[in-house]
Image (cartoon, grey):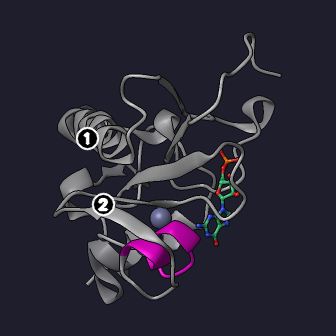
Amino acid sequence: MDGRDDIGARGLVRALRVLPPSDKIGWEGITLDPEDTPLTSSDCLFCRIASGGVPADVVYQDDHVVAFRDISPQAPVHFLVIPRRHVASLNAAQESDRDLLGRMFLAARDQARAEGIAESGYRTVLNVGPDAGQVVQHVHMHVLGGREMGWPPG
Ligand code: 5GP
Ligand code: ZN
C-alpha cells in the first residue's frame, strides 16, 4: 500500500478535477486513462444539467450529448449543446473525444433543423478560455439563429 490506493484512480481524478484543465491528467509520474475519468462532476453546473439534477429546457438528448435552451438567449433561437461527459473546454479534449465532438456538431445541426433555422442559417460558437469569455468550464456549443448576425463577433 503506497497511500495512493486509499482513494484509487477515480478518487484521484475527482481530486484533480478542481484544478485548472491541463492536457495531461497525472500525478507523480502516473498518467491516467481518460476512459477512467468520472462521467460527471458534481461541482459542474452543466454536468448537473446533463444528469437532470439542475432543471433546464432540454430540447435534445441522447446517450452522448444534451442540448438545452440558454438561460440568457442572445437570439430568437439560442441553445447549448454539451457532452454528457465532463470535458472542461476544447483545450481539455482528448483524441478519444473526437467522436464526441462530432456528435455535438451533428446534434446542433439536427436541432437547428427541428427549430426551423437550418435554411435561414445559424451560428455555432465554442468559447474557449478567458479571451473568448468562456464562463462555464464544461465544453458547450452555442447555437444561435432566427435573426441576422453581424461579423466579426465582438
Ligand atoms: P460561455 O460564456 O461559457 O460560452 O457560455 C455559458 C452560457 O451558459 C451563457 O450563454 C449563459 O447564459 C448560459 N448559462 C449559464 N448558466 C446557465 C443555467 O443555469 N442554465 C442555462 N440553461 N444556461 C446557463
Ligand atoms: Zn461538467
Q: Name the amino acid, label 1.
A: Asp
Q: What's the residue at 67%, 42% (across, down)? A: 75
- Check the image and report above or below for 46 versus 112: below
Q: Are marks 1 and 2 in contact (CB under 8 Å)?
A: yes
Q: Give the residue furthest to the top.
A: 152
**Local crowd at mark 1 within 10 Å, few (<14), some, or many (≥20)?**
few
- Check the image and report above or below for 126 versus 29: above
Q: Quadrant of residue 19 in the image? A: bottom right
Q: What's the residue at 21%, 63% (across, down)? A: 36
The C terminus: image quadrant:
top right
Q: Quadrant of residue 146 in the image? A: top right
Q: Which residues are magenta?
A: 42-50
Q: What's the residue at 66%, 65% (across, down)? A: 71
Q: Give the residue furthest to the right.
A: 154
User: In this figure, which residue is indicated by the disc labeled 1?
Assistant: 110
Ligand 1 is located in which of the four quadrants? bottom right
Q: Quadrant of residue 72 in the image? A: bottom right
Please give left or right for residue 63 compared with residue 34 in the image.
left
